[in-house]
Amino acid sequence: MNPQRAIRLKPTFTMGKLIIHILFILLCAVCVFPFLVIIGTSFQTENDIIKFGYSMIPKNFTLDAYKVILHEPKVLLNSYLVTIGTTVVGSLIGMWVTTSYAYAISRKDYSYRSFLAFFIFFTMLFHGGMVPSYILMVKWLGLRNNILALILPYLISGWFVLLMKGFLQTIPDAIIESAKMDGAGELRIFTQIVLQISKPALATLGLFFALQYWNDWWLTLLYMDQDHLMKLQYLLIKVLKNMEYLNSSEAIQYGLVKPGMQVPSLSARMAMCILAAGPMLLVFPLFQRYFVQGLTVGSVKG
């Protein structure tokens, strides 16, 4: 090799990249630290939390908070099943309904495109309120203590539709026109072409739906009276309220707890965070590679 023609390679690692790496490491540490504190505090005793505050490393390791929450494991397991079922079913149906609506208003050759776009935008500005929603679900549809009451209210959202519409508008019209020339119908175009191209946006939309259904407790409070239909979030809130009451003076006055006895309400809050958010923390990395792409592309033309 001629040394005069040799290409001089620049060093790939520079001081600027070193600073950027250090900044990102510090940022990751700042983001991870609260989770470690939550995990550590969930294993602390109530007296240690009151005396020393929240800590990443418990001074006296205990499982009292988890013992109280898992006192009736069948109830907790049932609430997990209800939450997982409503999350999976609601997310799948919601993605189909939202994507279908967004696809209709993204097609320039659809006659009612403007009306449907205005209709979904209008719902983002004005909402009927809790009382009309309750009357619709309970009196007209008869969904009191029905699992559908935990699914139907969140099936479609104006913001989700507009987000999906922005992504679908990036699909070239030539693809749809060529599919029509080959004899494909609208349903086949939508299912075999549009949905296949929209995987990044669908993953983002599915994550939004999953978080919405998983974190919901309000619908359980409104429409459910039976224990076997309680979702996880509502059950944990109910347990926490009971523990706070046991730490009150009224509970001591009525003899529900002994004087000086501490029910682990503070550590139980952290344990509830782990039980409630743990599954979502495991699911999020699966959608992470699609999340940024689907969100940014959908927001360009929205």
Image (cartoon, rainbow, N blue to C red):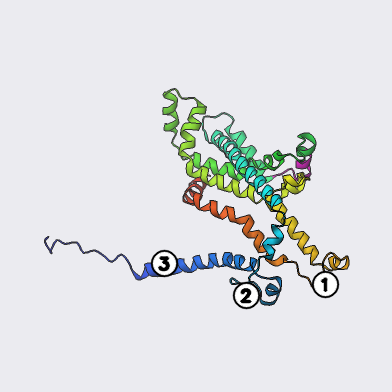
User: Who is closer to the viewer here, 36 or 258?
Assistant: 258
Q: Nearer the viewer, mark 3 or mark 2?
A: 2
Q: Can you say whether 299 is above or below 17 in the image?
A: above
> Residue at position x 64%, y 55% from top?
276
Say whether residue 241 is left or right of residue 278.
right
Quarter of the figure that contains the N terminus: bottom left
Q: CA distance from mark 1 to mark 2?
A: 24 Å
Residue drawn at point x = 35 percent, y = 71 percent: 15
| Residue that numbered label 1 is attached to | 259
Question: Local crowd at mark 2 within 10 Å, few (<14), some, or many (≥20)?
Answer: some
- Indicate which disc residue 21 carries: 3
Q: What mark, if any, has residue 59 been given in the picture?
A: 2
Outermost residue to the right? 254
State left or right for residue 252 relative to residue 267. Answer: right
Q: Secondary structure at mark 3?
A: helix
Q: At x 79% / y 44%, what residue is drawn?
A: 131
The amino acid marked with disc number 2 is Lys
- As helix, strand or loop, the secondary structure at mark 1 comes to loop
160 lies above or below 41: above
- The question of residue 201 being in magenta is answered with no
The x and y percentages for residue 237 are 72, 56
Instruction: Name the quadrant containing residue 122.
Output: top right
Secondary structure under tag 2 reads loop
Q: Position of residue 35 (x, y in %)?
A: 58, 64
Q: Tag 1 or tag 3, which sits nearer the N-term?
A: 3
Q: Residue at horizontal 60%, vertical 36%? A: 97
